[in-house]
Image: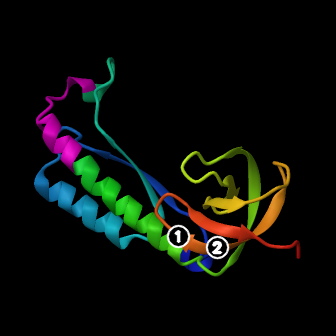
């Protein structure tokens, strides 16, 4: 309902894979559910027992390689969903909070929109201000854009 009411909202999910008892069918159902949901990003991690918890007493029945493979599959799904979310914003102008750092890969300034879109853009101004940025390209990691004159 949130995604229908606010199509530009970012919805994230934390997902654990490899919990004792997780079979292939359960994992497939998890994958299908996450693929169908309007989530925009996933934080995926493999189960690791924590001492003193009830789960720590359960038998670990999945090989570590299986857990790692499932983490990779869901991480790939999450990247595709984030890329699609970013792609929907190409051509739009986003209000970006300018951060006090430069992206080491591109040499561009970084910032974040109110709906958690990481933006890379040229900016000569100071950090800790909000600037309009027209999105020109999208990837899973971030969008790229050009700072526009203030509206």
Q: Is residue 135 left or right of residue 32?
A: right
Report the front residue among 133 and 36: 133
Q: Which mark is residue 135?
A: 2
Q: Position of residue 84 (x, y in %)?
A: 45, 73
30 falls in the magenta region: no
Front in this rendered view, residue 55 or 144: 144
Please say if 16 is above or below 8.
above
Q: Residue at x 58, y 45 (%)?
A: 104
| Disc 2 residue crowd, few under 14, some 14–19, many 20+, Cα 10 Å | many
Residue 57 seen in render: yes
Determine if the magenta segment contains residue 58: yes
Rendered-image quadrant of the C terminus: bottom right
The answer to whether mark 1 and mark 2 are in CB contact below 8 A is: yes
| Disc sitting over residue 6 in the figure | none
Seen at 14% across and 39% down, the residue is 65
- What residue does disc 1 label? 138
The percent position of residue 75, horizontal first and vertical second, equals 34, 54
Mark pair 1, 2: CA separation:
8 Å
- Secondary structure of the residue carrying tag 2 is strand
Q: In the image, what residue occupies the spot 22% across and 62% down?
A: 29
Q: Above or below — where is 122 with respect to 18?
A: below
Give the magenta-colored segment's residue range: 56-69
């Amino acid at each position: 309902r949130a995604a229908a009411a606010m199509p530009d909202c970012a919805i994230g999910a934390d997902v654990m894979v490899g919990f004792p008892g997780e079979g292939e069918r359960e994992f497939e159902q998890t994958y299908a559910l996450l693929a169908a949901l309007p989530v925009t990003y996933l934080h995926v991690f493999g189960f690791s027992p924590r001492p003193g918890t009830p789960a720590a007493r359960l038998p670990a029945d999945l090989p570590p390689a299986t857990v790692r493979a499932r983490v990779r599959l869901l991480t790939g799904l999450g990247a595709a969903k984030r890329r699609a979310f970013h792609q929907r914003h190409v051509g739009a102008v986003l209000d970006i909070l300018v951060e006090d750092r430069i992206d080491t890969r591109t040499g561009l300034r970084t910032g974040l929109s109110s709906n958690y879109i990481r933006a890379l853009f040229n900016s000569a101004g100071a950090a800790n201000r909000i600037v309009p940025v027209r999105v020109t390209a999208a990837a899973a990691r971030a969008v790229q854009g050009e700072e526009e004159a203030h509206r």
